[in-house]
Amino acid sequence: MDARTQSALLAAIVCLALALAMLLRPGRTRLWTAFALLNFALLAYQIGDFLYGIFGTTRTWPLRVSVGAAGFIPVAVLGFIIEFQGESAGRVVGLRRFATATALATVAVAVSPLALMPAARVTASGAVFVQLTAAVSLLYARMRRAASRTERARMFYLWVGAALCVGLTFGELLIRLAGWPSPPFANVAMTIYLYFLSQTIQRHRLLDLNELLGKIVVLASVGVVLTLVYGVLVRWTGTTGLFLFNSMVASFVILILFEPLKTKVEEKVLSIFFAERFQFVQALAALRQRMAGIIDVRELAQVVLDGFYETRRVTHASIYLLADDGLGFRRLDYRGPAPTPYIDAATMRALVQSAQAGQKAQLVELVERRLAELRQLLPESETESSALSEERARLSEIGAAMAAMRAGVTIPLIASQRVVGFLCVLDDRVPEAFASDELATMLDIGEQAAITIENSRLYEKMKERDRLAALGEMAAGLAHEIRNPLGAIKGAAQYLDPAQLQGADGEILQIIVEEVNRLDGVVAQFLDYSRPFPNAASGKFQSTDLNDVLWKTMKLIESSMPPNVVLELDLTPDLPPIHADAEQIKQVFINLALNAVQAMPDGGRLGVRTRRPHAPIELGLSEHTPRYSADQIEVRFADTGAGIPEEALDRIFIPFYTTKTKGTGLGLAISQRIVKGHGGTIEVQSRVGEGTEFILRFPSASALDTAGRLGMVQTPLAVEPVAAALKKVPA
Ligand SMILES: Nc1ncnc2c1ncn2[C@@H]1O[C@H](COP(=O)(O)OP(=O)(O)OP(=O)(O)O)[C@@H](O)[C@H]1O
Ligand SMILES: [Mg+2]
């Protein structure tokens, strides 16, 4: 058997393996099927060629098989190119028709006596080569059209490989025609090229040359090592004559060795030839270990971003987390130039949906390439055209979101089947900066980060629950221990009847009654705080006009305000309704207004404003995506009072924190819980001596609806333990 015949067998085996690998993989696409068909056509041709090499001219059927199969190669190649480039129009389709006709003609030649005439065979081969050359020229044209320099470079490999395969095969055929022994190069080149193609289409991206070389080196090294093992074993045991049995033993040894050997060889090849990539992957693996002991989300963000940044392989890195109100994503931390601090649900919709559909990461180059492809596609029908424009809109949305986050790669952080955030990295010095194995390691990091985020959330929730449970117990005890004696004291004081007593005694008794009332009020308010507030699930929420509630509340308060405080109302008309319990919201407004008045004993201004924040999102948005942050309604209470010192800012929402002699310190705590129960947020900005501003944001009813459909709304904290504890107390 000559080298060429043997190489035909090798090529046939590889074709079969690749075809089966494509067909057996789950989630097979049309492209994979087309590739499998191409491999089957080549397989048939190589088998015919191999058998021809074995039998020579003693049998005619191997010749017929290879002639017939050769006729199908151009059809299969064109079918593959059509799927690969997504082209279904013009020249390609015409060429395919011509190829189909040639395939049929070649089959006719193969089964007829013509197959034995060299002239007919040469004509058939000529037709096949003309078409393969046309197919190669399609790849060339595609390369010329490539949108980016890198894409062009990669199409170049693809084109050169194809041209080389066709050229070598043609050359060998000529050598064979001349009657010389032909070399095995064409088949070896084709085998490598097919492997390259299979890698390219499975990864949905063209490979870097060094990535491909790496793969080939790994595969070749593993092959060499295994052949050595196999050879030694078979040789050593082969003398017994039980050749088959011994081969089986050798194969078992190889099967057992294969995985660990592959990993080791891969590692070695990577560290020798691709030191940079090797170090990156190692650094990320070390990072994963460091992440293991972290529970705090901020610390996690720091460690992860530093980990990425210190590799010097990224110029930007950031982490975004789902905002408390669930209406968008807030930047948690970043390295490199600052990306947008907030990005809303509408802008993130496509990205979130793709993550929920199982897309593990988005690469900006893939989005861009697909967009460029879509722009060139000419829809054939109405439905196709709408499907195309839908996909285009979806991809532009993803591109816009990635641009705003300055991400080359976004990795969704998924916890409890919900997208809770995104890890974004970018290296803006080189396009398509990360190789597949690097991306795989990044995905692992993302997965682990998501677990930490989820754990941390659960931990916080548990802490809060414990706190509330303790509070509930305390409330129950307090109510019991204080209210009963208070009732007795008040009863006794009233029994003495202050009105009947003379002088100071009456006054003192009156004070006792008043203070008892006040204490009773404090206890009642505390009980109120410990009770779970109704939330959206309780069915008490209705479509509510915030302006209306605000107007009525402020009218109510205005009459009791000191004359030196000026109330300025600035209500933006036609605000969308929110989903709320108007009574509770009113309580919040009263608390805030009273605090403001109490902070301005010497008078001042209290400005109350409503508006719809239009925070434009920076950077590259398309015309189709909304330019504003999620639909929210903002209410601001700004006073010109004493202000709050910075160290107290963290404490004002804690129950019982008060600086007032007659305060309970519950006003803001209650207000915060009510606002959170409405899916909103409350923030404070203050400067000592200048004033304080409380900013409330509520999601509009329609925004909640959209976020709900996207699965992005967070459920407010459960407060069951308190309710349970309170059941023991007579209200
Ligand atoms: N507008 C404001 N200006 C300055 N300080 C404020 C303002 N609002 C709240 N504070 C500070 O926050 C503390 C807590 O406020 P909170 O409303 O929770 O309780 P309180 O007003 O002290 O008591 P209560 O509301 O029961 O009368 C206040 O004691 C005050 O120090
Ligand atoms: Mg108050």
Image (spheres, grey):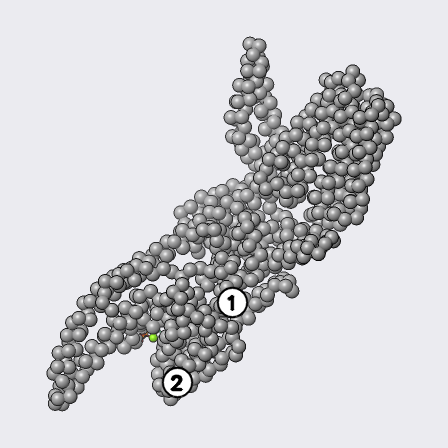
Where disc 2 sits, the SS reads helix
Tell me which corner region of the image, top left, top right, bottom left or bottom right, holds residue 636: bottom left
x 82%, y 32%: residue? 105
Q: Is residue 376 above or below residue 266?
A: below
Kind of residue at badge 1: Ser
Residue sticking out furthest to the right:
119
Query: Looking at this rendering, what residue extends furthest in the bottom direction?
Result: 503
* 294 relative to 273 in the view: left or right: left
The residue wearing badge 2 is 558
Tell me the quadrant of ligand 2. Answer: bottom left
Left or right, 245 with respect to 16, comes to: left
**Which residue is at a point 44% across and 47% down the rendered structure image?**
291
**The one of 18 and 592 positioned closer to us in this rendering:** 18
Please tell me whether mark 1 sits on a helix, a strand or a loop.
helix
Q: Nearer the viewer, residue 523 or 256?
A: 523
In which quadrant is the N terminus drawn?
top right
Give, as a three-letter code, the residue at label 2: Glu
State which quarter of the image contains the C terminus: bottom left
- Crowd rating for badge 2 (residues with CA inside 10 Å; few <14, some 14–19, many 20+): some
Residue 403: where, in percent of width, then height?
60, 58
Q: Which residue is mark 1?
A: 702
Label 1: how many Cα within 10 Å (few below 14, some 14–19, many 20+) = some
Indicate which disc, 1 or 2, sits on the residue closer to the N terminus.
Answer: 2
Along the viewing direction, whichever of 86 and 333 lies nearer the viewer:
86
Q: Position of residue 727 (x, y in %)?
A: 26, 63
Spatial CA span between label 1 and label 2: 32 Å
| Residue 684 - label | none
For the question of whether residue 473 can be seen, the reply is yes
Q: Is residue 207 in view?
A: no
Image location of residue 641, percent across then percent down = 39, 79
- Residue at point 43% right, 84% down? 567
